[in-house]
Image (cartoon, rainbow, N blue to C red):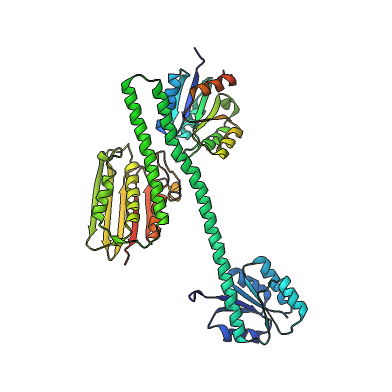
Amino acid sequence: MDQQFNFLLVDDSTLDLFINEKMLKVNQMASSIRKFLDPRECLQFIQSENTEESFIILLDLQMPIMNGFGFVEAYQDLELNIKKKYHIYMLSSTVDTGDIYKAKSMEGIIDILSKPLDPKMLKKLLVEAKFV
Amino acid sequence: MNINLPINVLYVDDEEHNLYSFKANFRKHYNIYTTTDTTEALDIVDKKNISIVLADQRMPIMTGVEFLEIIRNKHPEKIRILITGHTDIGAAIDAINRGEVFRFIDKPWDADYVKNAITTGFEIFRTREDLKKKNLDLQKANEELDHFIYSASHDLRAPLMSILGIVNLSEEEKEVEVLKQYFTLIQQSVLRLDSFVINIIDYYRNTRNTSEFKEPIDFKKMTAEVLATMRYLPNFDKIILNSYIKQDEIFLSDPIKVRIILNNLLSNAIKFQDHSKADFNINIQIEVLNKCCTLIIEDNGIGIAKNQLKNIFKMFYRGGLVNGSGVGLYIVEEAVQKLNGEVSVESIEKVGTKFTISLPGKN
């Protein structure tokens, strides 16, 4: 069986959270999935989580209150031993070159994937990245 | 020329009697400020809305040209006029090159010539100010357009990508019941996209339609029609609707704009219900009195946080986690402004929101 990961899904759309969860499950990529409609709640989870497990975060870009970039900025202020457990991929429907460039160059974001989530693409990226 | 607008004129001369006679001659035509002191003169230009500055050339501390040069650097938009009793070519050259003066007036001055100089100068001043304002408006419109394209592309594309996601999922799915569920999800996404498109059409109609279109508005009928279009919204059945509509006179207004206002405020009241509460209440109160309409829409929904209240009328601003385009209240405010009305909002988080709109009827 393929390698499985812990996922944190952050998106303001319940529909997209549902789709992404289902996609990961169908493709047997997830050992656990947690969904967050509010990015601030995900930040709280990250700070309170104290196992040694590592997580893949699939982060939406355009969200009210706090957008994906705002999330990463707040995330960057966290301690290094917390951050080493998390790997952030942005997942967005944006076609704005400015957004895509910013996501690709921003520290803390590994890459940006376009919606809808392509499990084969994600699998390939995760295998290449060799997260344990 | 707009005769209602006072023309503020400043005249600087070290000889007081010149100032007196200038005032005596022109105070009926313009708002005149005078001083013998160039420092005070700069202060007046800073504080008063001066459009024309006249200066005498021969003054003890600085010459008229030097003074007008300072004005030119600090306030290039002011119209500058130099007055001199001793025409020498050097001063004239300086006045043009350093002070970039608009006119050069010989002493003793001829009242009609001065009047003509001030009036023509003011015309130029006003034209430049208008141009500046138009440029600012244009800049604002351009920024809005950029913002619009950025946000619209997201709001149009996001539901489409959701639909594509569900379609991708359904390719692997064999269970009929699950597939049926997928269709419901697609339907929701389509409705969301459609409500965005309708919002954009409203926005377009609202901005482009500047004509003085008016017809009698029957608020009871219009409210019923608007509510009828909302009966498919989620949770509509659970809402307790209280409506009090009092209209004993004819109210003339633009029905498209009034409908946009009612439509957006009511759909917001339905959309932003507080699901932790036992009852969902919406109160509609409309009263037409003395050709004026007061329209109140109140709900006991999730409310708006204090720090977000100032943003709710901004285009594409989305306050909460509930899906919306962020266009609705922007259009409401625009429509109210175009009808010369006023909109105010009171809201307490978790308690509810109350929008009050007053609209003057057209004649």
- Of residue A105 and residue A57, the one placed in the foreground of this image is A105
Q: Residue at x 27, y 66 (%)?
A: B290
Q: Using the image, determine if residue A125 lies above or below residue B188.
A: above
Label total for image: 0
Can see residue A16?
A: no
Q: Position of residue A21 (x, y in %)?
A: 43, 24
Left/right of residue B298 with respect to residue A64 in the rendered view? left
Quadrant in the picture for residue B251: bottom left
Seen at 49% across and 45% down, the residue is B149
Q: Quadrant of residue B193?
A: top left
Residue at 39% over, 57% down: B209
Q: x and y percent of residue A90 in the render?
A: 53, 31
Percent across and percent down for residue B328 are 39, 48
Q: Is residue B195 above or below residue A129?
A: below
Q: Is residue B310 visible?
A: yes
Residue situated furthest left in the rendering: B248
Observer-nearest residue: B313 or B282? Answer: B313
Apparent side of residue A63 relative to residue B245 in the rendered image (left or right): right
- The C terminus of chain B is located in which quarter? bottom left
Q: Nearer the viewer, residue B154 or A89?
A: B154
Q: Residue furthest top?
A: A1
Q: How far across and down, in percent of the image, does residue B231 sit?
A: 27, 42
B343 and B109: which one is in front? Answer: B109
Above-or-below relation of B219 to B116 = above
